[in-house]
Image (cartoon, rainbow, N blue to C red):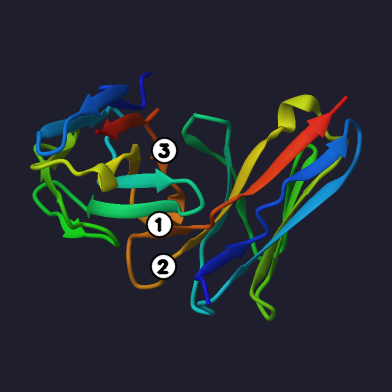
């Protein structure tokens, strides 16, 4: 049982390049989330999707776009990467929102040079 | 004031010690509370939910004080493997979202 799978695990981008971070869950969860984690800042919500076909901005959405492709998959796209987007990105899912806690993927370590 | 505040630590304790962490939250309407554990360079993992009456899971005890808006985590008989960062997590009322504290780092030494 894989849980939440993120790809890639590591990535180095040059400023201005684009890329998509992939996330898939096999737990039939309705809600999915993208966070970034920076030293001293904790986890900050970028975007979330309460159900298939819906997406909403979180705390720090600028510079990112998302797609909830189907119930399983929720991707995060950086259209023009900036050094400020160097971070660890975590995808998470939940069966029904905040009351049940989240299950996290193993993360993507992104460096923008 | 931060929505969820934790002492960053580190708390350095010997094996076998008892250690407690506190966390305060700002929104009195919050209803769901959790402790997550995060190992270095790994993802956060749910350690335990926190219930109004307090709850225990082996060596771990969680307490909630709604009047003072704080949550605590007590670890008894600390093990080397307990070394990690512990995240206090609270729901954002009226939304599907959780708010994560920045974590308290625990280091257990032999």
Task: Give the mark nearer the N terminus: 1 vs 3.
Answer: 1
Quadrant where the N terminus of chain A is found in the figure: top left
Q: Disc 3: which chain? A: A
Quadrant where the C terminus of chain A is found in the figure: top left
Q: Which mark is residue A103?
A: 3
The mark lying in front, picked from 1 and 2, is: 2
Q: Disc 2: which chain? A: B
Quadrant housing residue A30? top left
Question: How packed is label 2: few (under 14 Cα within 10 Å), some, or many (20 or more)?
Answer: some
Asked whether the residues under the numbered discs 1 and 2 touch, taking CB atoms below 8 Å apart as contact, a structural biologist would say: yes
Q: Which mark is residue B90?
A: none
Q: From the top left corner, tell me how far across and down residue A96 is, in percent.
A: 33, 51
Asked whether the residues under the numbered discs 1 and 3 touch, taking CB atoms below 8 Å apart as contact, a structural biologist would say: no
Q: Secondary structure at mark 2?
A: loop
Q: Secondary structure at mark 3?
A: strand
Quadrant housing residue A9? top left
In space, the residues marked 3 and 2 are separated at their CA atoms by: 17 Å
List the residue tagged with mark 1. Answer: A98
Q: Is residue A56 above or below residue A43?
A: below
Q: From the top left corner, tell me how far across and down residue B90 is, in percent.
A: 51, 62
Q: From the top left corner, tell me how far across and down residue A98 is, in percent.
A: 40, 57
Quadrant housing residue A79? top left
In space, the residues marked 1 and 2 are separated at their CA atoms by: 8 Å
Question: How packed is label 1: few (under 14 Cα within 10 Å), some, or many (20 or more)?
Answer: many
- State the residue at coordinates (62%, 41%): B85
List the residue tagged with mark 2. Answer: B92
């Amino acid at each position: 049982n894989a849980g939440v799978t993120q790809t890639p695990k590591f990535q180095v981008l040059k400023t201005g390049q684009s890329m998509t971070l992939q996330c898939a869950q096999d737990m039939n969860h309705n809600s999915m989330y993208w966070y970034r984690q920076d030293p001293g800042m904790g986890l900050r919500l970028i975007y979330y999707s309460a159900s298939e076909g819906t997406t909403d901005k979180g705390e720090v959405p600028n510079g990112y776009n998302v797609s909830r492709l189907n119930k399983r998959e929720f991707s995060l796209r950086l259209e023009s990467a900036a050094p400020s987007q160097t971070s660890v990105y975590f995808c998470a899912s939940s069966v029904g929102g905040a009351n049940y806690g989240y299950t996290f993927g193993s993360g993507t370590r992104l460096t923008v040079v | 004031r931060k929505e969820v505040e934790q002492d960053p630590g580190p708390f350095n304790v010997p094996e076998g010690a008892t250690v407690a962490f506190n966390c305060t939250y700002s929104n009195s309407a919050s209803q769901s509370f959790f402790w997550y554990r995060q190992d270095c360079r790994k993802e956060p993992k749910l350690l335990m939910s926190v219930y109004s009456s307090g709850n225990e899971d082996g060596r771990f005890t969680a307490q909630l004080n709604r009047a003072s808006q704080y949550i605590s985590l007590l670890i008894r008989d600390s093990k080397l493997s307990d070394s990690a960062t512990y995240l206090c997590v609270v729901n954002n009322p009226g939304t599907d979202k959780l708010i994560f504290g920045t974590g308290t780092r625990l280091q257990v030494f032999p």
